[in-house]
Amino acid sequence: MAQRAVWLISHEPGTPLCGTVRFSRRYPTVEKRARVFNGASYVPVPEDGPFLKALLFELRLLDDDKDFVESRDSCSRINKTSIYGLLIGGEELWPVVAFLKNDMIYACVPLVEQTLSPRPPLISVSGVSQGFEFLFGIQDFLYSGQKNDSELNTKLSQLPELLLQACPFGTLLDANLQNSLDNTNFASVTQPQKQPAWKTGMYKGKPQVSISITEKVKSMQYDKQGIADTWQVVGTVTCKCDLEGIMPNVTISLSLPTNGSPLQDILVHPCVTSLDSAILTSSSIDAMDDSAFSGPYKFPFTPPSESFNLCYYTSQVPVPPILGFYQMKEEEVQLRITINLKLHESVKNNFEFCEAHIPFYNRGPITHLEYKTSFGQLEVFREKSLLIWIIGQKFPKSMEISLSGTVTFGAKSHEKQPFDPICTGETAYLKLHFRILDYTLTGCYADQHSVQVFASGKPKISAHRKLISSDYYIWNSKAPAPVTYGSLLL
C-alpha cells in the first residue's frame, strides 16, 4: 500500500482558476512501481496545473461549469465513493481519492499494484482505504484547534517535514500527524517564532517573489573525423523573496516540456529543507534513458533576505543551438576565411544579440579586407586584429548564414598587438556571443501558478529565463584539435 501523490487545494470561487494548490507532494519511487505494475495502462501523475483544472471540472467546482456533460453528469456516473477518474491529456488518471471540506480539497492517487485495464474492483485496491486514512489525518491536523488563516499557513508550512516521518516514500506509517509534530523540533503554533541569527532583519512591504533561470551553453566544434564535437548546458536558478514574517516558507517547482532534457547534477542552496531522492541521484555520469526523472523538480525552502542561487544543474541536450563550420587558409600574406553557421530548428529565433568574434592574434594590424556575407554586418577592429560579425536579432528563414573573404595584415608590433597562446598559426577559432530572452535550451521553466508561499499576504510572483553563450568555440577545421574541452572551459 502506497500513495503516488497528494494535494491540498483551496477552493476559491470567483478567481480565474477557481482554486490554488496549497501543498503537493509526489513520490518518484512509488511512481516507478506504478509504471511497472500498470504496464501499458500506466498514466503518469500530471503537474499541478493540469491536475487542478481536471479535478475542479470533475467535482463541478468551476465557475463557468453549468452545462450538462455526458461523460461526467449522466446517471451512469453517479458517484458515491469520492473516487474519480480524471481525464488529462487524453488519458484517464484513476483512482483519484478526493473530497471537499472547509473550502479545502484533499486529494491523493493511490498505487494500484496490477494492470488498470480492465479496471479492477475498488475492494481489491488496498491503497484506496489508506488514501482516505491519509487525507483524514491531514484534515484533522490542519483544523484541530485552528482559529485563523495564519495558523493554517503555519501548519501547511510544517507538512513537508511531517510527511517525511508520517508517510516516507509514499507509505503511510502514522495518520496522526500530531504524533509526528511532537517528535520534531517545530516551534509550537501558539508560540512566537524566534528570528534565526543568520537573518539580520525582517522585510516590511509588499510581498513578492522573483525567479530567474539562466542557462549557459558551452560548445567546442571541430568538424573533424575522429574528434567529436562537445557541448553542455549549465543552469542557475536565482531567487529573491521579499516576504513578511520571521520564517516564511516557499516551494518552487521547475518543470520541463514533453521533449525537454532532464536536469542533472543538481546542487541546492543550504536553505532548501527537503528533496526527493530522484532529484539528488540524477547524474550526468549515468547513461540517459527513458526512465530518467524529468520533473517536476520541487524545492521547498526558507528564503534568506537577499537574492540567492536556489540551485545549479547541468543537462545533456541533444544538439547545440548553433552549428558552425570555420576554415582558415594561409596564402602568402593573406588569410582566406570561410564561415558557415546554422541555427537549429528547435531553437527560438529571437536573439537579444548574436555576434561572431574572429580574432587573428599574433599577427599585425589588418590593412586590407575583402569579404562577402549572406547576412548581417561585419565590423573591423584593425589595431586589435579582430573581426566581429554582427548577426543581429534573427537568422533568416533558411536558418543558415555564411561569410567568406580574404584578410591582409601589416607588420607586427609586439608592444600593441594582443597575444593568445592558443590562437597561434593554424589553431584559429571563432567565438560566438549570443543571448536569447524568455527561453532555455532544456525547456526548463518555473510555473508561476505552482509556486507555493506560506506567509502573510498574497505575493506578486514573477519568473524570467534566458539562454547565454559561454565559451562557445568553433575551431579551424584545417587545424589539429588544439586543446581538450575540459581544460579550456574550467
Image (spheres, helix red, strand yellow):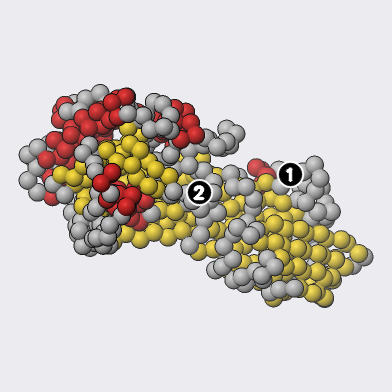
Percent across and percent down for residue 299 are: 36, 43
Q: CA distance from mark 2 to mark 1?
A: 28 Å
- At label 2, counting other C-alpha atoms closer than 10 Å, the crowd grade (few under 14, some 14-19, many 20 or more) is few
Q: Residue at x 18, y 34 (%)?
A: 136
Q: Earlier in the sequence, mark 2 or mark 1?
A: 1
Using the image as rendered, state which of residue 435 and residue 448 is in the foreground: 448
The number of callouts visible is 2
Using the image as rendered, state which of residue 312 and residue 91 is in the foreground: 91
Which quarter of the figure has residue 23?
top left
- The image quadrant where one finds the C terminus is top right
Q: Which residue type carries mark 1?
A: Ala
Q: Which element is circle 2 on?
A: loop
Please name the residue that numbered disc 1 is placed on: 228
Image: 186 above or below 433: above
> Which numbered circle lies on residue 258?
2
**Residue 38 relative to residue 340: left or right:** left
Q: Which element is circle 1 on?
A: loop
Percent across and percent down for residue 156 are: 21, 42
Q: Residue at x 21, y 62 (%)?
A: 14
Image: 175 above or below 54: above
- At label 1, counting other C-alpha atoms closer than 10 Å, the crowd grade (few under 14, some 14-19, many 20 or more) is few
Q: Residue at x 57, y 62 (%)?
A: 348
